[in-house]
Amino acid sequence: MHRFSLTPRHCLRTSCLFVLLATVAAHGQQSGVPNQELIPGVPPATPVTGPLPGVNSFPIGLTPLAGRPYVFELEYRDPAHMMPEDLQVVDSLKPELAKEASLLTYDLRSPGWQYHQIMCPAFPDYLFLSFTHGPDPNGSSRFVAALERNGPRVRIVSRYSHGMLPFDSSWNRPATREVFNRIIRQERGDMPIGQAPNWLVIGMCYAELSGNHVQVLTVHPRPDATLDLLRLGANRPQLEIDSDRSADVTFSDASQPGKTTLWRLHFDRHGEITSAEHSNERQAPKIALKP
């Protein structure tokens, strides 16, 4: 089975530019072979010439490191900073939101509920809201809701329920994948994720929908921070495409001190997610190098 990888690079101080690398295709061009599609239906990789909408890159203060690693992160907005049209969507869908929440034993009429908007530019037809309730920082109850901007539907993914974790983790629950795939089908049809220049954002949106806020490690500048990635137990974000047009999206999350979470999301040839892997790596205090 043939496979090639695409890897984003951070290029500017305040914006993210992605250069998509297709090693096999480039080798064919250098050797005089006519430029053909490496995988049928997947166009040759081309560089993205503008910043990735909605994704900020900034340094995080983990030490001791040779340089401060940079992360990608989706923007969060509290209700006071949401756009008026987004607040209108929330207001119009309040009855449906309350009904869907009640099916999961969440009573939105009780005091203490708070929410913020997750800015997910990969899905412009949906509004993502993260709800928390309870005295502890993570919320004794926590869920994420996806609201249709131009329709009546509200879809909910539960993370915590009254202080108790569900039996299955939300990031690998079939119900979470089904909610996400419904959104995928509505927004992108059956297009393979290999044709999506914003594949990393799609993966980050899945993590956020499952209730996991992620800060995705990148490298800035290259190659000085290579050992820092090793020190953090991290990998650069990658898109690995198989010959059947299925693909894996992988990235490393550094949102929690002392550990790095490695994500691997598998998408079938229709662009729908079929499995998710999630593992934690302890961040080593030192790296021992042979002389």
Image (tube, rainbow, N blue to C red):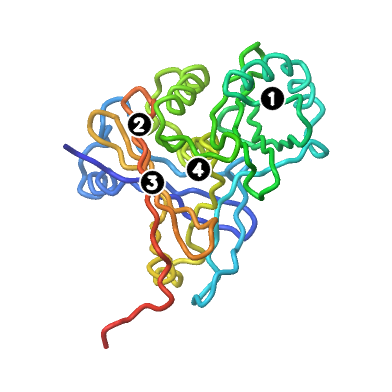
Give the alpha-carbon distance from disc 3 to disc 4, as whole Å.
Answer: 28 Å
Disc 1 is placed on an element classified as: loop
Give the alpha-carbon distance from disc 3 to disc 1, as whole Å.
Answer: 30 Å
x, y percent for residue 218: 48, 57
Residue wearing tag 1:
107
In the orientation shown, which residue stands out farthest toward the bottom? 291
Which residue shows up at 33% across the image and 30% down it?
Answer: 42
Q: Which sits earlier in the primary sequence, circle 1 or circle 4? A: 4
Q: In this view, does 90 lie to the left or right of 194?
A: right
Which residue shows up at 61% across the image and 40% down it?
Answer: 53
Q: Are marks 1 and 4 in contact (CB under 8 Å)?
A: no
Q: Tag 4: residue type?
A: Val
Determine the image quadrant of residue 132. Answer: top right
Q: Tag 2: residue type?
A: Phe
Which residue shows up at 53% across the image and 43% down it?
Answer: 212
Q: Are marks 1 and 2 in contact (CB under 8 Å)?
A: no
Disc 4 is placed on an element classified as: loop
Neighbourhood count class around disc 4 (C-alpha, 10 Å): few under 14, some 14–19, many 20 upward: some
Give the alpha-carbon distance from disc 1 to disc 2, as whole Å.
Answer: 34 Å
Residue wearing tag 4:
48
Disc 3 vs disc 2: which is toward the camera?
3
Q: Are marks 3 and 2 in contact (CB under 8 Å)?
A: no
Q: Tag 1: residue type?
A: Asp
Q: In this view, does 102 lie to the left or right of 284?
A: right
* Image quarter in which the C terminus is found: bottom left
Compared with 225, 112 (above or below) is: above
Residue wearing tag 3:
278
Which residue shows up at 35% across the image and 42% down it?
Answer: 277
Neighbourhood count class around disc 3 (C-alpha, 10 Å): few under 14, some 14–19, many 20 upward: some
Compared with 291, 224 (above or below) is: above
Q: Tag 3: residue type?
A: His
